[in-house]
Amino acid sequence: MSARIDPEEAKEPKIRLRPVPRPVNIKIGGTLTSEAAYRYRTYMPSSYLIFDFGGDEQNAQQARHKLESWKQGFRLGDKLAIKFERYQTEPDEDEKAEEIEGASKEPAGEGRRGGKKKSPTKGRKSKESGDDQSDASGNVRLIVRLNFSDHEKLSLQRWLDRIPTEEPFKAVDAKIVRHNDPDFATTNQLFEELA
């Protein structure tokens, strides 16, 4: 025999839902839907590390390579920026006279048709020795900007401690300029002017 199902029993019981309260605007500091001030992005104090490599261009390039690998490996992005400051010291008058004499002799010898040509190795050696002298008279400074936000103070301190103790940086003079140091304004301006 078939059992009859009452249509009212077959319906599921109705659940009554309460109305959801709407957000209330607070007039004290603005509204709940206003844009939040980005606390960690508005002020990011920078710290600078300045390494004076003197005339050692090779160590300066090794240091740059190491910093670039850290930047990529630790995903530092804009938090670590590197710039070089190269400046030449004025050579003595004797060196200037030698350069002028050497420059005047080279074109005269090459301009002759019947003259002997110099071997390429001799020319290279003289040019390389001249480059070594110019590197010795020029100084290279590496300026590293660490730009961590306020909540990353521990990371900033770890990088400030780590970088000067690594291999290419150990042998050179390092100077740390923090955002509250008196030299900060001049260092910041110098960093922005460098290409």
Image: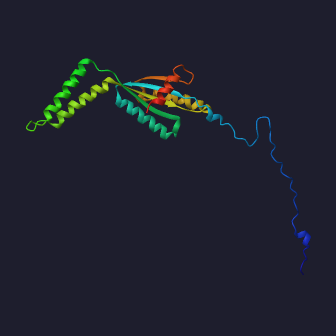
Residue 110 position in % (x across, y down)? 14, 35
Say above or below: 17 vs 173: below
Residue name at image x 11 percent, y 36 percent: 112
Q: In which quarter of the image is residue 116?
A: top left
Q: What coloring was used for the rendering?
A: rainbow
Residue sitting at the far bottom: 1
Residue 8, quarter of the rendered image: bottom right
x and y, in percent, of residue 27 in the image: 80, 37
Residue 35 higher or lower than 129, as above or below: below
Q: Which residue is drawn at 31% across and 24% down?
A: 136
Pick the front one: 65 or 104? 104
Q: Tell me if residue 76 can be seen.
A: no
The residue depicted at 29 percent of the width and 26 percent of the height is 134
Q: Image quadrant for the C terminus?
A: top left
On the rendered image, what quadrant is the N terminus found in? Answer: bottom right
Q: What number of labels is visible?
A: 0
In the picture provided, is 186 more to the left or to the right than 30? left
Is residue 107 or residue 149 the one in the foreground? 107
Instruction: Tell which residue pokes out farthest to the left in this image.
Output: 114
Q: In which quarter of the image is residue 3?
A: bottom right
Q: Position of residue 71 (x, y in %)?
A: 48, 38
| 2 on left or right of 138 | right
Which residue is at 89% across, 80% downward? 2
Q: Is any atom of residue 194 visible in this view?
A: yes
Q: For this view, does 132 lie left or right of residue 151? A: left
